[in-house]
Image (tube, rainbow, N blue to C red):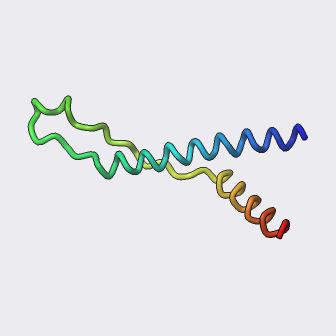
Amino acid sequence: MASRVFLWALFRRELLSFHSTVRGWQTERRAEPARHPSLAHRARPRVRFRPVSMTFYLFLFMFVCLLGHSM
């Protein structure tokens, strides 16, 4: 039971980090450089690309396996 809670907490953290990564992609797509130095403070910050961690894919794989096993 404790291990299940631990795994769920870890998975939730991975899911949240994945969500922030996707949001980072969206802001990066919308970000555009300032046209004039005086407009520099209005430019949206560029978010650097953050790859999804390997544990997220591991949990995704485990979830799919469990789903297939329960069917």
Residue ranking furthest to the right? 1
Look at the picture and state if 30 lies above or below 67.
above
Left or right: residue 55 compared with residue 37: right
Left or right: residue 29 compared with residue 54: left
Q: What percent of the width, then of the height, locates residue 59?
A: 72, 54
Left or right: residue 6 compared with residue 41: right
What residue is at 87 percent from the left and 41 percent from the top? 3
Question: For residue 39, what is the image quadrant?
Answer: top left
What residue is at 58 percent from the left and 42 percent from the top? 16
Question: For residue 5, what is the image quadrant?
Answer: top right
What residue is at 78 percent from the left and 44 percent from the top? 7
Q: What percent of the width, then of the height, locates residue 13?
A: 65, 40
* Residue 5 vs residue 48, the one in the foreground: 5
Look at the picture and state if 61 lies above or below 8.
below
Quarter in which the N terminus is drawn: top right
Look at the picture and state if 39 lies above or below 26.
above
Q: What percent of the width, then of the height, locates residue 6?
A: 80, 39
Quarter in which the C terminus is drawn: bottom right
What residue is at 49 percent from the left and 47 percent from the top? 21
Question: For residue 43, what is the image quadrant?
Answer: top left
